[in-house]
Image (cartoon, helix red, strand yellow):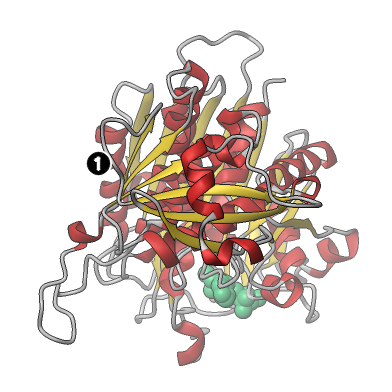
Amino acid sequence: MNISLITSLQKQTPKALILGAFAKEKTLSFPKWPVGLKDSFRATPGAKNFTAKEGSFLFYHDKTACLVLGLGHKKDFKKEALRQIIAKTYKGQIMGKYSSASIHLDSFEITPLESIVGITAETLLMSDYRFDKYLSKKDKDGKRKDPAQNKTDISFLCAQADSSKVKKALAQAQKIASSINKARDFVNEPPNILRSHVYAKEIEKDVKSALKGCGVRVKIMGKQELKKEKMNLFLSVNAGSAFDPRLVHLTYSPKKTTKKTKHIVLVGKGLVFDTGGYSLKPPMSMINMKYDMAGSATVYGAFRAAALLGLQTKLTCLLGITDNAVNSSATMPDSIVKARNGKTVEILNTDAEGRLVLADCLDYACDQRPDYIIDAATLTGAVLVALGHEVCGLMGNDKSLMDRLLDSAKKQDEYMWALPIIDEFKKDIKSQIADLRNIGNKHYGGSAKAGAFLSEFVRDGIPWAHLDIAGVAGAQKHLPYCPSTGASGLMVRSLVQFIRHVQV
Ligand code: BES
Ligand code: MG
Ligand code: ZN
């Protein structure tokens, strides 16, 4: 999809023109519509019954196909409603039907204009996402399916299209959406292709192309380096694999830094596949475990967007990448392993592997002298029980950091909810014969107990937060701007929002 800004339709006539209308107490009035379009709308048979109810729409014909979107009552207007209206309209009425469409943004009567430009562009680009690279390009009738044929050129029609604020809003939305879609691409990639070393290389490739000149450096660590770093918990997860692990260490430095420049370390769980290991998952639970690297893709997506936007924050991004497989050298339940920070862990369930990888990565993160550490992981099935597919679990050791994350999520209309790490949960993961055990003694509260486990690897005084994205990483049937199957790309926007405002 290509999105451009235009001030008039003089040069080209789009195949479809989209207009917005708010519901009015009496008859509809369209203060920002071009005169001719108002007249032809009023002459349309269905126009009399059109009340601009939120989510309703009406087609009519002027010089081109016109589509009026009902936005509901202005006093009830919510950004998220606009996102959903735009996404549904694009997927249902435009995509694959019209090769070009223009959106008359002034007719939407929403101010400031740049905010609607940003939201609309971001939503369209998120909605246009497809993961079709493995389709053999033929549909049922044997005809070639050419994805390029389905491409739509979108233009935003607004009087202030030339203003620098509007141009900036479009450019920023493109940077964020491309990073969300990049994260989705990684998550959707199958595990027989996306081996650990391949994933690490692909990230490096993306950094060297998309982030060239943005101040980003990459270091990829392999098995030998992890051994040198004494990351034995991380290595224990990789012990049954035919493929060596990788720790991808990315840094971003903004052009100007001062003593006050904050440094955030983002840490991501990158399990390219999770079989459970010796504590093998049953077949139905193993399906979709290629998504177990979504935490790493999410933090990479946020890091990538922040670097493209040139945000004034120093960032480190640590991606702990391996699969969790079984062979004769795989870690056996009952094993006791010493973590990078010196604590010993009794591994009672090899399927509770994400916390082992993250534990060593979090200790390594503490060495980077961060102001904040935020990790993202598809850590527990229990978060689905607690919060469903729709809500991201938040845990941490610092109320003010957690509040800021909740606020960032709210501003982006993403659902995030805090779960408590109480002392009882911390006690429950103590072992009789080692410092810690990797699962609780007692059932229930699995997500926060995993959080309690992680907290043991964050040094005192460092504010840390953990996002359990096991629910939100996959398909989001209720969100029309997310694909109906596959990776959602959620939480990238919340993290970018947080990074963007952390300096103040
Ligand atoms: N990757 C899973 C968590 C998961 C489950 C993500 C379902 C997405 C959907 C994680 O490694 C895991 O297996 N966790 C176990 C922990 C348990 C053994 C304490 C779980 O949730 O069952
Ligand atoms: Mg597991
Ligand atoms: Zn896992």
- Amino acid type shown at disc 1: Lys
Query: What residue lies at 58% left-to-right and 58% top-to-bottom?
Result: 84
In this orientation, which residue lies closer to the viewer: 375 or 130? 130
Query: What residue lies at 31% left-to-right and 70% top-to-bottom?
Result: 190
Res. 335 in view: no
- For mark 1, what is the residue? 205
Which percent across, then down, holds residue 8?
38, 29
Query: What residue lies at 65% left-to-right and 36% top-to-bottom?
Result: 110
Which percent across, then down, holds residue 135?
20, 73
Q: Is residue 125 above or below residue 486?
A: above
Q: Is residue 234 above or below residue 212?
A: below
Corner quadrant of residue 459: top right
Q: Is mark 1 within 8 Å of ligand 3?
A: no
Left or right of 435: which side holds 161?
left
Res. 291 in view: yes
Left or right of 98: which side holds 178?
right
Which percent across, then down, holds residue 88?
51, 63
In this orientation, which residue lies closer to the viewer: 343 or 123? 123
Corner quadrant of residue 338: bottom right
Which quadrant of the rendered structure holds the C terminus? top right
Which percent across, then down, holds residue 484?
47, 72
Query: What residue lies at 14% left-to-right and 86% top-to-bottom?
Result: 141
SS class, disc 1? helix
In this orientation, which residue lies closer to the viewer: 140 or 376? 140
Mark 1: give few (<14), some (14-19) or many (20+) Cα within 10 Å. few
